[in-house]
Image: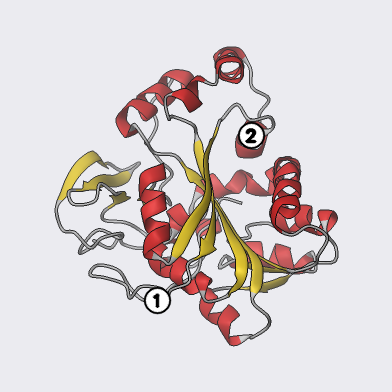
Amino acid sequence: MTESATMAGCPLCGGRKERVLFEEASAVLRMRIVRCGDCGFMFQNPRVSELMLEDAHAEFTEYERYPALQEAKQRLYEPRIRRILTSFFPQRPGRFLDFGAGYGAMLQAFRQARPDWELVGVEPSARAGLALSGQGFEIRTSIEELATCGGAPFDWINLDNVLEHLDDPVGSLSALRNLLARDGIVFIEVPNESFFRLRYRLNDWVRGSSKAPTFPGHLNLFTPRTLRRAAGLAGFRVTELRGVSAAEPGRMEALFGIEPAGRLLAILRLLRWTRLDHLIGMTYFTQCILQPLEVPSPVPGPGRKSSSGGPGRQG
């Protein structure tokens, strides 16, 4: 695997003070997660950007199950697509960009819901990109390639479990803002990393075994507060921000391809009945909808690159 790169500063604020939250260096796992002493953002340092790899889908074993999850993911996405189209784009066609398109679950669900929309995907993995092209989708490998192709601005840009993979999340959002229509939206979903240490102790208890606190490709660990800050730095206002429970119908099937049973099923039922994870701010995911501010995107500060690169992907 490609050697990891050490960050000179926080990907959000450029700060150089950091506190170690988790560290392991073994033959099985090399991971070091830190919290910025200035802004509180959590990130891996050092880190292996997926863009440094020849093909992340071939490198990370976690990606092996993704092709088998496509139908479950499509079912999960369908109500989301209907809700957002009804709220922002009733009865009009537009352009949709899935940034980090994976194997095409979101693109397929969108095509079925609104065949009158123009659909484009960005996916750096050659393996996944080949599968997408075979489904008839227009695919690019990076923001830079997309920008050179021209075309009308996008009405909806989608980053579903992607922002946490990007080496420069603020720079990438700023670059995407330049491809967005003035009245367009950016939809983001990321894992919610609030209560970091407690969350992963609870996850180990639910699984009945110890595991790394995050996926190796998750370079950035967002909380709702730091996600809002990243959006603002990139020139966006947050129109909607909400937590999404692991107990959401179809979520476990789309994530892991499993029908919940035993201890996990009991916990999910409890969360559905009580909404306890919402009440204490420990939902599994955070979703937000962004719209552009009427001001130019800020110039990246210290520790942030101006280039955007392409996405990693959980789809």
Label drawn at residue 307: 1
* Amino acid type, callout 2: Arg
Residue on which disc 2 sits? 251
x 74%, y 59%: residue: 89
Q: CA distance from mark 1 to mark 2?
A: 33 Å
Q: Quadrant of residue 118?
A: bottom right
The reply to whether residue 26 is in sight is yes
* Label 1 with label 2: CB-CB less than 8 Å: no
User: Residue at horizontal 62%, vertical 44%?
Assistant: 65
> Picture coordinates of residue 137 (x, y %)?
75, 69
Locate the N terminus by quadrant: bottom left
| Mark nearer the N terminus (1 vs 2) | 2
Say which amino acid is labelled 1: Ser
Q: Farthest left residue?
A: 17
In screen coordinates, is 229 left or right of 149?
left
Give percent across and percent down for residue 80: 69, 45
The residue closer to the viewer here, 1 or 151, is 151
